[in-house]
Each structure stands twice: as structure tokens, then as C-alpha cells.
Image: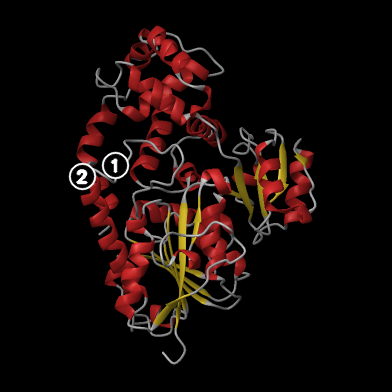
Amino acid sequence: MPAGWRNHREGDCQSHSRWKSMSRTPKLYRVAARIVEALNQMPQSVQPLLASAHYPNKGQLAALVTRVAQKLQVLEAVVTQSSLLEQGVPKPITLVLVHEVLFGSRPLHSGICPRIDQVLACRPQLEKALAAVPQAEKAPLPRYARVNTLLLNTSTVIQQLEEAGFTRIRYPRRRGLAWFLERVCRLEPHEFLKDFHLRDWLVFGKGARLTQLDLVHKAQLLLQDKASGMAVVALDPWPGAVLLDACAAPGMKTSYAAALMQNTGHILAVDKCGERLQALRDLMQVGGFKSICKVQEADFLDLDPSAEPQCASELILVDPSCSGSGLCGRLGRELDAHSDEGRDRLRRLSCVQAMLLKHALRFPHCKRVVYSTCSVHKQENEDVVAEVLTWSKGQFVLAHALPELPTRGLGPLGDHCVRMEAKSSLTRGFFLAVLERAAGH
């Protein structure tokens, strides 16, 4: 079982007592803090968390969570210099309230609740710490959004965005990727481009106010990092395919696969975490792909490759729990790969990751498997792929994944793998490899 899932469950009792002590804190901040904590415990898309949150004003909640995420590194640096954590204030609610004190559009006043009083009392300390944070500490990535072509076409979405006040920037592809990336860095919050690589994907400037759009609320425009979409493109699902998503929740890759399959064929979406699967079910309902997708709460390792319906799977996507080291501005303490603790955690993670990938190769009709992580560590990426290829004894080979992408992997297998990261790709850190069944096997 992936370590991230175990840790999440082991911490439930402690988490309950901490949240109980916050009961007088306004609900908006409590719910936002819960989402912040969920993002810390398990790398995932924020959109399903927002959809399943028990808060009536989804736009207000989404705007707050987005603003906190955009300033996360600055907030981390400021909070670390304060005494708030020593006073017992949980880190997620601390980050949310400190954001509101330092950057909120409306001033917070004392007397609302004890937590806010604690943060306000530290305001001079927080402002001093903020002044010491280098301006380059936080360079937000652009915002990526995928048109849900199961509901609307891209032309209609662009028209509605322009009617909402956004400006589309057109560019000639002949200028190349370097020009495109440089232009993306100069996008204003109200500007957007069509993505250079991915059809039906749009790129918006930093600070774009997307979460309040009806297009987003209706799942017609899905907020998804470009790197995660590349894993589905590498899998290359065709209309009518039979696809198994092995670690499916919260469902953004599943949804994209359904779109590329033009809502035909069959998808089995498997995940062990029932709470996260609910987010996938919610997305199925509003996202237009419930007719081809079956959801199963199960550990992928417990699936019998020879049993129906999974025995018919032709394509398998394996995107397991990982260290999350590629997530820009991820909450919590970074994993130190050179410490004893860090090496031990990477060893445990890579062991589970290799087990999952090996299990995917056991499905008798599987033609292609994509393995992906949001980790930057070679131990979770190229090393896992190398181990599994050796184990397969020639039944599967490493395909040349997405050859049009210039950012490749590390080591002897690196040229066949893809790595993406903030500096060269303007995305979060991501890795993917494609394994295909060898001829005659």
C-alpha cells in the first residue's frame, strides 16, 4: 500500500483533534485549510476537492485556495519565521489566515475567533518576515486548463472566455517552442494562448481568475497541469479502447482519456481511497463520461489480471503515490533524498511503485502501459522502470515516449523517457515512461 495512504489514515485521530480546536474559526477558512492539508498529504488536483467540499459558495472557496497556493512559498517562509506553529496553530489554517492578514482584500478584525486573534497578534512579526523574503522566492507557473470536449468544443470555450473579458494571444507555431515559452512567461492575468503541444489545452497568465468562471463550475473547462495530461497523451487511447486506470482518483487523467476516446470503449477506474474516489464519481457526473467509466474501490495489486472485466484491458495507466517532489510549492517538509529518513522513504515508495508497474504487465491483453509520477527523484522514476524491464524478461520494451518533447530522462534509459519541470517546461516536475508489449509476446 503506498506510504502516503498509510500516513493519511494513521494521522486521522490527530487530525480530528486539531480540527476540533478550530471549530470557532469561520467555515470558509476551515474548509480551505482542509483542502490545503489534503493537498499536502496526497498530490492531487485541487478541482475535485473543491467540488466535494461542504461550502455553499464554491467560487469564494476556490478563489481563496488558489490565492494561497499561488503564494505558498512566500507563506511558508513567513510562517517559519513566526511563533505561530510553536503556539500550536495547525500549519494549514496558519497558512490560510496568514495569507488573509498579509494579502487578503478585506481586513481581519480581532474578536472573530481565537485563531485569528493569534495571527493578528503576530502581525508585526509576520510583516517583518515578509519584507525579508526575496522577491524571486515565488515565481508562479502559468495556469493550464483543458477544454472538456465531451461537453463543449474549444472554439465555443474560447468565445465564452473572450466574452468574459479574456484576450486570446495568437502566435505562429513556426516560431518554435522557445518563443512560445518566453511568451507564456509574459502573459497577463487576462491573457491566454492555445498550448504548443496539446490540442484543446489553454495556457493562462499567472493570477488568472478562472475558478469563478461558469465554464469551470460546469466542468466544461478543467484546471489541470499540463504535465499530467502528457501521461494520457503518451498512452494514446483510441476510440473504442479498453483502458484501466490503476490509481485513478481524483479522476483528471481518467476524464482526459475518456475525451481522447470520444466517449466510446470502456474505462475501469480503480483506486483504494474511497474518499478520493468520490471526487472521481462527482467528476464523472458533471464531466460527461459516466457512460463508459466503471469505478471500483480496490487495491490495484488485488485485481486478478485474468478475471473479468479487467482481463480485457488493452491500455493501463499507472500513476502511483510518490514523494510529490515535483509539485511546485507543495505544503510540508521537503523530502531530503540524502538523509537516512529520506533514503528509507524513497526505498519504500519505489518498492510499491515497482510492484504496481509489474502487476500492470501481468494483464494478458495489455498492449501499452504508461508509468508516471510527479517526483523528480531517479529512484522513483528511471530506476523503477529499469527494475521492471529486467523483471519482464523481454516481454515488454521501453518505447520512445513523446519524441517531440526535448526534455528527456536520466541515465541509460533517459532518452526514451520524458521529464518536465518548471524551468524548462513551465510545468510542475513530472516523469513518464511508456512500456509496450514486445512482438511475439
Q: Which quadrant holds residue 349? A: bottom left
Mark on residue 213?
A: none
Q: Which quadrant holds residue 395? A: bottom left
Please name the residue shown 44% across and 85% down the image: 438
> In what element is the residue under mark 1?
loop
Q: How is the image coloured?
A: secondary structure
Amino acid type at mark 2: Glu
In the rendered image, the residue lying farthest to the front is 412
Marks 2 and 1: CB-CB under 8 Å?
yes
Please name the residue shown 25% across and 62% down the image: 351
Q: Percent position (x, y) of residue 47?
A: 51, 45
Q: Nearer the viewer, residue 38 or 360?
A: 360
Q: Is residue 26 visible?
A: no
Mark 1 closeness class: few <14, some 14–19, many ≥20 residues within 10 Å: few
30 vs 283: above or below: above
Q: Nearer the viewer, residue 410 or 223?
A: 410
Q: Percent position (x, y) of residue 355?
A: 28, 68
Q: Quadrant of the C terminus?
A: bottom left
Q: Earlier in the sequence, mark 2 or mark 1?
A: 1
Mark on residue 336?
A: 1
Mark on residue 341?
A: 2
Q: Percent position (x, y) of residue 305?
A: 33, 80
> In what element is the residue under mark 2?
helix
Q: Percent position (x, y) of residue 9?
A: 24, 47
303 vs 290: above or below: below
Spatial CA span between label 2 and label 1: 8 Å
Q: Is residue 343 visible?
A: yes
Q: Quadrant of the N terminus?
A: bottom left
Mark 2 closeness class: few <14, some 14–19, many ≥20 residues within 10 Å: few
Amino acid type at mark 1: Asp
